[in-house]
Image (tube, rainbow, N blue to C red):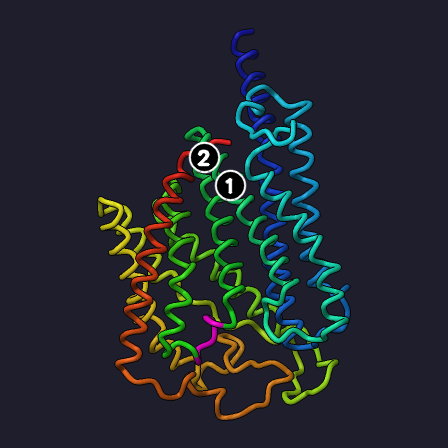
Amino acid sequence: MGVLASHITLARADIAASDRTWPLTAVLFASGCIVVGLIWDISWHRTIGRDTFWSPPHLLEQLGALVAAFTCGWLVLRTTFGGESSARETSVKVWGFRGPLGAWVCIWGACMMVTSAPFDDWWHNAYGLDVKILSPPHAVLAIGMIAIQVGALLMALARQNRATADTQRRLSWMYAVSAGVLLALQATVLMENAAFANQMHNALFYQWTAVAMPLILVATARPSHLRWPATATAAVYMAIVLVMMWTLPLFPAVAKLAPIYNPVTHMVAPPFPLLLVVPALAIDVLLRKLQGEWVRAAAMGTSFVLLMLAAHWWWSEFLLSPLARNAVFAADQWDYNIRPGIWQHQFWPVEQSWQVFTVGILAAIGTAIATSRLGLWIGAGMAKVQR
């Protein structure tokens, strides 16, 4: 009887653990829908134009918001009124309700996303196409999207930090996936300034990537229990973009809005993902080998910029060459309303002195050191997250 009781207890514990894990899986699914929908939405604008608010990528984005909202709303209600005492003890109280910290962030982000929908529709009806990705309604949408990704990250992190040894690795990988999705979202938001091969001989490219990429890689790597956390995060980001880059051009599409200077016939693919796995490897090594916050930050920030420079300088020349104009590398794909020209295969700006470039790279290194230090500080706080 004692053995049977023991097995029953373990079975109940497994069921309880599964019950606590499915909301995290649902939120990760929602965050995946959002980042895929965003990349698809940008491709839709670049290929077809703004035809209707009820386009498939918009619906996918809002589906992600609704899944996150309903899942986290259910989780809050269950924790408040029907949850176990242990669940309430590892929750945060807001207006009398209790729920995980990540769930509250997701709910807030979902509200921002849903609120942005009618604002975005009105904006397009009033002003037409967006000149930039970050128009006012898109900025509200982006804040909501990032909040949901951060909420998913916090939910995965809290579960990882409370996990026992037998479930910790699985939860650590779920945490790495959530970090990779966040990195993919950030890279997509920066697409106009730091994505195209034409920009990679310009110091501004390295300054833009130094603003947010080291922050995410360092902050999410520090509390992770994986051996190569930053590398795993960068690999998830690259996998997401590569799948979208290889999938979207399989679908035929034509522009529906004038002027049409570049008559595309298939969905325009996003640019090839940044080679972030290269500096991510260095971040993982330095995080383990070095001591002292500023020493780590200086080494990681400097390594990030110099390795990004080494990786992308010649890689960008390849992407601008005829060898990359194929389905594998998806180079030389442009919007339907952009006039084709020699500029497509040139670096922007065409002329930049080495003195100006060197000063720009030094500025990028300084930025990367500062964001790496901030990432270490945030990561140290994240390592303590239990709720």
Q: Looking at the picture, how far across and down is residue 160, in whole percent?
A: 46, 36
The residue under the point 69% across, 30% down is: 77
Q: What residue sits right under mark 2 in the picture? A: 385
The residue under the point 38% across, 63% down is: 210
Kindly state the secondary structure of the residue where label 2 is placed.
loop
Which span is picked out in magenta? 193-198
- Residue 153: say if magenta: no
Quarter that holds the N terminus: top right
The residue under the point 61% across, 44% down is: 106
Query: Are dots 2 and 1 in contact, CB under 8 Å?
Result: yes
Kindly state the secondary structure of the residue where label 1 is placed.
helix
- Residue 197: say if magenta: yes
Q: What residue sits right under mark 1 in the picture? A: 154
Q: Looking at the picture, how far across and down is residue 205, in whole percent?
A: 40, 72
Crowd rating for badge 2 (residues with CA inside 10 Å; few <14, some 14–19, many 20+):
some
Position above or below: 285 against 90? below
Frontmost residue, 187 versus 315: 187
What kind of residue is marked 2? Val
Q: Looking at the picture, how far across and down is residue 222, in whole percent?
A: 36, 44
Could you tell me what secondary structure mostly forms the magenta stretch?
loop
Crowd rating for badge 1 (residues with CA inside 10 Å; few <14, some 14–19, many 20+):
many
